[in-house]
Amino acid sequence: MDIIIPPRNHTSHLSVILLWETEESRCEECGGEISGTAFTCNYCKVWKHISCADKLNRDPPLEIIHPLHLQHRLQLEWSYHSDFICDKCLYISTGYIYRCFPCNLILDLTCASSVSGQLPKDQEPLRFKDGKKKTIFHYSHSHDLEFFKYRKVREEDYDCFWCERHLLPSEVCYGCTGCKFYLHQVCSDKFPRTLSHSFHPNHPLRVAYSTSPFTNCNGCLKLCDTDTPLYVCEMCSFRLDFDCAKLSPSLKLDCHHHLLTFFKDFNNEGVWEYPQQYLYCKVCGKDCGVASVYHCVQCDFNLHLKCVAPASATHKYHIHPLTMMELIKEDDSEKYYCDICENERNPKDPMYYCQSCTFIVHIQCILDQDKVALRKVPSSSPPPMEKKALFVEQNEGSDVIRTLSLFQPTTHPQGMYKITAELGEKIYCNGCRLVLNGSGYSCTICVFYLHEKCAKLSYEIRHPFHSSHPLNLYTSNVWHHQFIACDECRDICDGFIYFCEQCNFKLDIKCAALTTHKIGVLEEKMTGRVTELHHFTHPHKLVLANCYESVYDIKCSFCNLQILGPAYFCAERGCRDIFHESCLRLPQKIGVPFHPNHMLVSRLLPNCQQCYACACTLELFSGEFVYSCEHCDFNLHVICANSLRRPLKCEFHLNDLYYFGRNHISLFDSIWDKDFKCEVCDGSCEGEPFYRCLKCDINFHLKCVRIPYTVKSKYHIHPLLLKDSFIENDSGKYYCDFCEEERNPNDDIYYCEECNGQTIAHIECVLTEVEDNIEIRKNIHEERFRKELKNLVARFMKFLSNECRPPIEDVIQAGVAVLVLGNIAAVSLRCRDLVLGHGALLPLLALLNEPVSCSMLRNATWTLSRFCKPPFDQVKLVLPTLARLIHSKDEVILAKACRALSYLSNGTNDKIQAVIEAGVLGRLAELLMHPSPSVITPALYIVKHIFTGNDVQIQAIIEANIIAPLLHLLQNDDKYDIWIQATQAISNAISGGTHDLIRFLVSQGCIVPLYNFLYDSDPEVVTVGLQGLENILKVGEADKNMGITGGVNLHAQLIDAALCRERIKDLRYHGNTEISEKAVEVLETYW
């Protein structure tokens, strides 16, 4: 069969090559050596024989249709800088490539020129049944490894990652060409999953992936590659990369009690865990960074190679002088020996070498003979410092400071404190993910909690659910951040698990406590569901599991809503995609009424766009699943595309309205602070369903649209009632009985109460066919609004009238004038003083103490907050009223009353004292735990202002138990405004507090929030965090000088353990001069 080449002109890469002289190069075309004149490309640094270039005199076509792949055209590419594996011959190649992008089929130039459409018969073991080349998942690498045949395509040979020997021509290997990671077939089974290593003799090391891009190897101290696993001891937080795992100690010196290991190009950059003295040579005292050293991994003991062995030496068994060399391979036998002791030597270790002959010896053999005396070196490393922390024990009448040792569990790298008091909120154990009740442990550095039994789990167990092999404990997600599910209960688990590396069997902690299977539980959860499937939204297989994560929300990759219940997740390593079961039932193409000309197709968005339904309110991000029009620049969120299918015809608005239900609430969480208000009442649409006109970009509350509570439909005998949601059964599938399409069980609906919910329908489906006279309701609605507007204007005109000047008491009683007064006072302080000058305050306070409606109370409280803006001299007059208002159950009243108190507390110590004496602090501690940010934020302002007062006033804050909820907000609230106000409050306390107060705040975990401040983009926020940490260090230094901490600055150690010192080092290069100078000052003073 002939190759079909479309007629098309093309100027190839070879049209710009030059003739040049070379001595040792290799032809990119045939792979042969070149010596003499040849063609080269200066840009790509590739060479071609003149004869090979002549063969390609005719430009290769841009596109071809190949008999091996007739369904699509293959596109020409130039791929010299990266290798690829040809799908026909399975050889590794470089240079020209023909690719089918939809099918990801790749052919090299030679195979693309072949007229054969048959695959080689001898390659069948290397292919799947469909003819595609085989791939495997191997625990030594994070990507798929492909089968391929090796041939030399570069100047240097490729080596096997494990044995480090060359790949042989035509040898079948595994490889990831993108990472240049290659394995011999025989070496793929040689990677031990568990390793006993002399660098860490106390515990075995297990294969695991780095959970952070800033993880250092304990051997070479370099950052670990996140695509290649490590050998890890989780009990000791000890890590070895694969290169260091292959090393072994080889040198014994009298000055140190361990064997030393040779490291070439030892690199300590970015290493914060080790005190600086550990990173210097013990002989010359110079830095060991980027140098060849002998290193003791257990003790962090270092010696430069040049300080260990002289550049030249002699030996009694050899007549010539010997020169020290770092890398010697005398032949390709791959087995090398010392010519003195005749033991095998490592070719990567430095040796003494005779340049006159092939005499090669260990350094150890030379040193043992000559007894080379090193300069005086410490004989051992100092013992590790015991972890201790200061606590303030609050006894009546005195603060007694005592030192307590930390508990070091086997399941957490930092020390933990035992929880002895009842926690004020629901806390979950990070091990079993169950509610923390009873005794437990807490780590204040990383906000980590454990049951007592979870802190003392066995490192290895035998379990009846998997009796063939022992199960090992894993305390972090070592599967490259992928989801994992327990093989017993199928629950997705992000806590601790027991794992069998040989069988890939996983058991979460709650199931590990069982001894018999829960018969029928798993089957009941999974009844009628496919356990594995492929879906058009995802390239990998999806697996069924249960998602009941308690610590944080797991959101669907398709609709971006929280998942609770059955879900399908991708089990591939490094993939975090998970989907609602219902989302996988969504069609690949849909139509919406507000884009009638084209269908919308589900796809991953390549770049940021705007959702048409949300207008400019919410952005669609790159890589997000959307429904898009292939012909127009039209995109929708998955939620919008599937819920906005039924328009509501409303008489008082010209265009159709679309229902935004409760699923949209979480979608809009980040943008409620924008102008997202109801067009009718001007109230916020936050936290409740609403209708939206997509053309006008305006919104309406359901109550403002005047959706009737009861309607009579032509399709049902009984009246239908409006209900905010209805779930008739636990099937997980719910439908509208009018349109028979699937509905969201959380959305507002009409249902028949007399039929016990047997008839349920969308609001839009019901209101299109009702028996009410809609025109009459429309007229009544408009008439009511006309009367309210007329009454409002009359009252306002009466207030402004020059002829009629009613007493201010009557104006306030008029209702709407309360808001008018507040609005006038809000214009400026001069206007506020004008209103107060007319005697408005006392009647307003009287109104607030009368039994009035909630709406009137809200308006009056808001007006009072406008009156209280500083400077305000009548503080004591309004405090009793505000002290009563902050006990209201209404969120709006609470928010406005707290706002007024924040104004009153923002001043001199006299005003702060008046606020404290009003008795508001006890209630303030409760308000900091309020669910609404609108209440928490002004409450935080009050605390922040009081912390600027004197020592007595700050002590009142502590005695009111406000510190605990304050720290809780710092550690758990994800809203930036709340977090920053809480941290500023703590910073105020540290800057003006006593040493005892600062010690107490440190013991309560205030260091981590200040550390987070150091990463803020606002220089003022960074400065606040830096000053707060400096004040803590000052107290620690004072304690050290007093001799109560054993001669060490304990606060400096805690700050170092929280990674603060590393960040302060980075701040030396901050763009703000004051910050950089302060960072240098702190480092020089305390480290």
Image: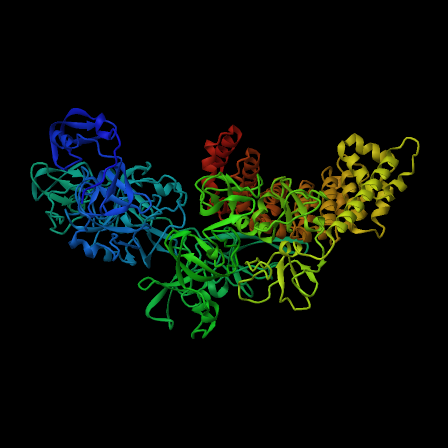
For the question of whether residue 757 can be seen, the reply is yes
800 versus 809 height, above or below: above
Q: How many marks?
A: 0
Tell me residue 277's x, y (percent). 37, 41
Identify the coloring. rainbow
Pick the quarter of the image with the N terminus.
top left
Tell me residue 1043's x, y (percent). 52, 46
Q: Nearer the viewer, residue 425 or 1083?
A: 425
Q: Residue at x 10, y 47 (%)?
A: 339
Q: Nearer the viewer, residue 136 or 924?
A: 136
Tell me residue 66's x, y (percent). 23, 44
For the question of whether residue 967 can be seen, the reply is no
Q: Nearer the viewer, residue 938 or 152?
A: 152
Left or right of 964: which side holds 147? left
710 versus 276 height, above or below: below
Left or right of 1066: which side holds 702? right
Q: Residue at x 62, y 52 (%)?
A: 964
Tell me residue 1058's x, y (percent). 48, 46
Identify the image quadrant of residue 866. top right
Q: Nearer the viewer, residue 712 or 897?
A: 712
Left or right of 537: which side holds 954? right
